[in-house]
Image (tube, rainbow, N blue to C red):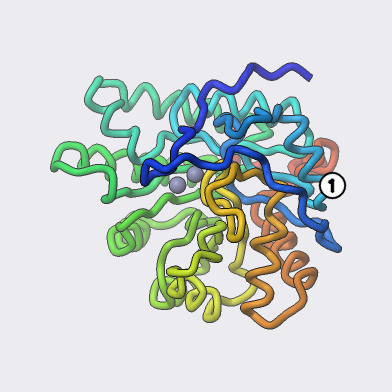
Amino acid sequence: MVISKHPRRRDAKAENGARRDLQYPEPPEPLGVACYDNHTHLEIEDGEAGLEIGEHMDLAAAANIRGAITVGGDVESSRWQVRAANEDEWLLAAVAIHPNEAPNVAAAGELDAHLAEIESLACDERVAAIGETGLDFFRTEGAEALSAQFESFEAHIGIAKRLGLPMQIHDRDAHDDVVATLRRVGAPEGTVLHCFSGGPELARICAEEGWYCSFAGNVTFKNAENLREALDVLPRERILVETDAPFLTPVPLRGRPNAPYLVPHTVRFMADRLGIEADALAQRIAENTLGLYGPFDRAERAAWRARGAGARRG
Ligand SMILES: [Zn+2]
Ligand SMILES: [Zn+2]
């Protein structure tokens, strides 16, 4: 299988400037039942090994992670994800302009054209979601940039609803505005807060609205008690798991390269917190994932769409 080399590479230094350990961690003990990575960025290379897509997915399969959604952040990376998902049966794609990228695209006068391109990419049958879109008040500031971010978020909501696709939301320091925007404009049927970063209050709102919360490796971080409290109050049918790889590697592997095969660490940690068996949680998450995005397997996906699941798409 030939997929172009990784177009991006993660910084070898951590955010605090320290050198990271670039070795991929040992594979974990596989889960007893198949589970899925709701959100990863396979186009961003990391680590000394520089794993190719097929190697990533073989490692994932050995850990019983039977699929991943690889997520775009601009037109170019979204195109890459769609190509990857067409070449690897265990990958589905999500396409969007990231909220930190939207202001740059808008400043260049290209927002409408790029949104049109995202909508046309989203019609590919290997695209499972619109994402990641949303609001990020941590990295974006200034009235003009923020207004472009809101405009882009609302436009992505429109695309998701027109195509009948779920949506993966990036919400950084923007809980209130994300919720208010979704309520004002009307949320797509399958709305997911990726790398869930709120506490129990936001989790209760999501439960009320029927939105999914996808937990990344940071749920294992020592200072993330609010995430664990959110997990406590969520109905199980709203829980998803993700890596957001190559970032947010779960403890005790923090700082090392992250990849879909490391999902079992996060599932085991979450199950432990909830006081249930890891395989019971994995099973629940697998059902949530497949119910939301449909099957990964090409033939099963075609049959699923033929039954009308994909019929809303033009
Ligand atoms: Zn994000
Ligand atoms: Zn992401």
Residue shown at 77% from the left, 30% from the top: 54
* Residue count near mark 1 (Cα–Cα under 10 Å), binned few <14, some 14–19, many ≥20: some
Residue shown at 77% from the left, 55% from the top: 28
Q: Which residue lies furthest to the left in this view?
A: 143
**Amino acid type, mark 1:** Ala
Provide the residue designation for mark 1.
Answer: 62
Give whichever of 27, 240 is nearer the camera: 27
113 horizontally vs 258: left or right: left
Q: In which quarter of the image is residue 126?
A: top right
Residue shown at 41% from the left, 34% from the top: 97
Q: Is residue 72 above or below residue 221?
A: above
Q: In which quarter of the image is residue 140?
A: top left
Q: In this view, does 173 lie above or below 281?
A: above
State whether label 1 is within 8 Å of ligand 2.
no
Residue shown at 75% from the left, 56% from the top: 35
Q: Position of residue 260 (x, y in %)?
A: 68, 46
Q: In which quarter of the image is the N terminus?
A: top right
Q: Is mark 1 on a helix, strand or loop?
A: helix
Q: Position of residue 145 (x, y in %)?
A: 20, 37
149 horizontally vs 91: left or right: left
Q: Is residue 71 above or below residue 7?
A: below
Q: Where is residue 110 in the image (x, y as percent from the top left)?
A: 30, 21
Q: Position of residue 108 (x, y in %)?
A: 25, 20
